[in-house]
Amino acid sequence: MSKQEMPPETESATQSGLEKREMLPKLRLLQIEPTTRCNLDCIYCARRRLLEGGEIEKGDISTERVLVALNKLSGRVETVLYQGWGEPMLCRDLPELLEMAHEIGAKTTIVTNGTVFRPEVFDRCDSITISIDSLRPEYNTRKGSNPIKIKENIIKIRENYPDLPISLSMVVSQENIDDLEQIINFAKQVRARVRLLSQIGEALPPINEADIKKIESLVALYPGFVEWSRPEELHTNKEHPQLKNSLYVDIGGQVSIPYHETSVRLGRIEELDKITDQLIKKDEEAKLAGNL
Ligand code: SF4
């Protein structure tokens, strides 16, 4: 019998409420959108279109509402990821939001575009992912960004946080496939992992089969250091393994499956604890069924 399956009466009388809940099955990932504001305008990003079409609002999430919702999930979440249609660093209350996640016993992580250095944020992260598509100064797919400045920021983060796990996330297309090696060498220099993603849509010339083979051979060459995934699979398959036992909350407080925010509404942030319970139960049942 694993610790998670132990009945309450076998637990030590000295355990705190949070410690007891730590033993229960958890939500694997709670993704919360801190803001839809951004200082870049990447040509493959849907943010501008969604804002102009009125499909998402512009602004920051209510810190108060997150506080109330997270307090009801104490000990029930493995990791809280702050990421959405915007740059998390622009959210003033991001340090508080990260602290709230730690207070309920969750690990914290963010995905940032690397343009802003905020120590009060990094101090409260257990890991971070930084998006960078090229180190060439003239590369302007991520409109408004300066690859040299982002590179400097990444070096600064590593110097100031020697033990912080860092991943570099690169959206690969025909425009930057030849930059792969340089990105991998830089990642080695700053002790970061590399996550390669294909773009959603066709804003950039897409990679071809030969490029995919090249990527797959790199993944095989650097197991655990270079990862490769195709986000379009996440968007089209609600049963994708990466979406299992995960929830997404947007700035308006809508709860949904990550990457399916406009098509699958599960409820409001005020019901997040109930939605979480249902999802965990479903996940446990699926695991049991798989073990039979
Ligand atoms: S930095 Fe992120 S949110 Fe901002 S435009 Fe680029 S992809 Fe979209």
Image (cartoon, grey):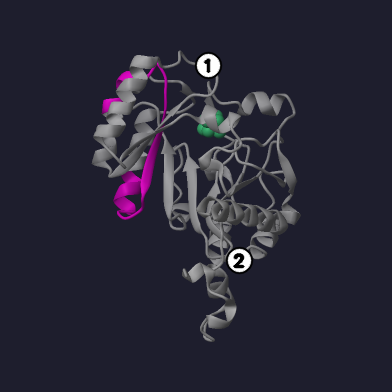
Tag 1 residue: 203
Q: Residue at x 70, y 33 (%)?
A: 262
The verdict on residue 177 being magenta is yes
* Camera-nearest label, 1 or 2: 2
Choose between 193 and 64: the one closer to the eye.
193
Percent from the top left, x then y, of residue 264? 71, 38
What is the distance, in whole Å, between disc 1 and disc 2 at their CAs? 41 Å
Can residue 93 be seen at all in this image of the molecule?
A: no
| Residue located at (34% from left, 54% from top) | 161
Furthest residue toward front: 292
Q: Residue at x 48, y 71 (%)?
A: 3
Q: Does the magenta run of residues contain 73? A: no
**Would you say 113 lies left or right of 103 here?**
left
Question: In the image, what residue type sits under mark 2?
Answer: Ser
The type of residue carrying mark 1 is Ala
Q: Which residues are magenta?
A: 155-181
The circle drawn on residue 30 is none
Give the residue furthest to the bottom: 13
Point out residue 226 in the picture as x, y percentages from the top left corner: 32, 36
Mark found first going from the N terminus, 1 or 2: 2
- The residue at which mark 2 appears reads as 74
Q: Nearer the viewer, residue 47 or 123?
A: 47
**Ligand 1 found in image quarter:** top right
Q: Write down the quadrant of residue 87 in the picture.
A: top right
Write the residue at 27% across / 35% down. Answer: 186
Whether 174 is drawn above or below 105: the answer is above
- Asked whether 40 or 44 is in front, the reply is 44
Residue 137 lies, with reference to residue 23, above or below; the image says above
- Mark 2 packing: few (<14 Cα in 10 Å), some, or many (20+)? many
Q: Number of labelled discs? A: 2
**Quick one: 262 or 138, which is closer to the camera?**
262
How far across and how far down the image is residue 62, in percent? 69, 51
